[in-house]
Amino acid sequence: MIRRFLLPALFLLCLVSAGAQDGDLERFFQDEDLESLIDKALQLQITAKVLPQDQQPVWNTQSKKITIPGRSVAVRLVGDNIRIDVVFTPYQEESGTLLLVAQGQVWFSEAPDAKTTYLTTIQSIPVSWGEKVLFFPLGFSKELANTQTFNIQLEVEIYPYRDLFRAPVAE
């Protein structure tokens, strides 16, 4: 008897929830016109690299993420015995000053049956447009300089989204 009423109630709840989200979206676009939203939009160019000590990268990948100030962009790197989640959140003040907040979470184990180690970091970094910010989710230790190690490096650059579409001015 309860099951017969539970399914329609859940369906009705989903409809009410979806309607609320549509209403929120409509209010957002009434408050913010599309041009204003595009003017605020940012592009994060993220390059992930695996680097042996003082050598060329053995692996790298690039991605471009579009966001607005205060909205985060997530990156996940997964290997056999490691998982790295990094969340980048750019903030822009009225003066145009940029702040990049980088939150990292790392899970790794030395061997498949070994215990898993968890590390977390958070850093707030003032940046300029197009400035390269290097983020090492596993850290960068001078103590390991004598051994053959690999560093994982994330490189982040922030650009105004609108500037990416402006044609260069001919002189």
Image (cartoon, helix red, strand yellow):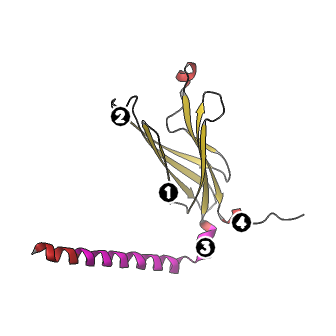
Residue at the disc numbered 2: 116
The amino acid pointed to by label 4 is Phe
The local crowd at label 4, few if under 14, some if 14 to 19, many if 20 or more residues have their Cα within 10 Å, is few
- Taking the spot 26% from the left edge, 76% from the top edge, the residue there is 11
Q: Nearer the viewer, mark 2 or mark 4?
A: 2
The amino acid pointed to by label 3 is Ser
Dot 4: element: helix
Q: Nearer the viewer, mark 2 or mark 3?
A: 2
Q: Earlier in the sequence, mark 2 or mark 4?
A: 2
Q: Earlier in the sequence, mark 2 or mark 1?
A: 1
Q: Which mark is residue 165?
A: 4
The local crowd at label 2, few if under 14, some if 14 to 19, many if 20 or more residues have their Cα within 10 Å, is some
Residue at the disc numbered 1: 72
Image location (x, y in percent) of residue 54 = 65, 28
Image location (x, y in percent) of residue 88 = 52, 51
Q: Quadrant of residue 42?
A: bottom right
Residue located farthest toward the left when viewing the structure as drawn = 1
Residue at the disc numbered 3: 36
- Taking the spot 55% from the left edge, 30% from the top edge, the residue there is 150
Range of magenta residues: 10-39
Which one is nearer the viewer's eye here, 17 or 29? Answer: 17
Is 14 a magenta residue?
A: yes
Query: Looking at the image, is 120 positioned above or below residue 166?
Result: above
User: In whole angstroms, how far apart are the C-alphas of marks 3 and 4?
Assistant: 16 Å
Image location (x, y in percent) of residue 156 = 60, 48
Q: Are the residues at dot 1 and dot 3 in contact (C-beta closer than 8 Å)? A: no
For residue 67, side relative to residue 85 (left or right): right
The local crowd at label 1, few if under 14, some if 14 to 19, many if 20 or more residues have their Cα within 10 Å, is some
Q: Main secondary structure of the magenta part?
A: helix
User: In whole angstroms, how far apart are the C-alphas of marks 2 and 1?
Assistant: 27 Å
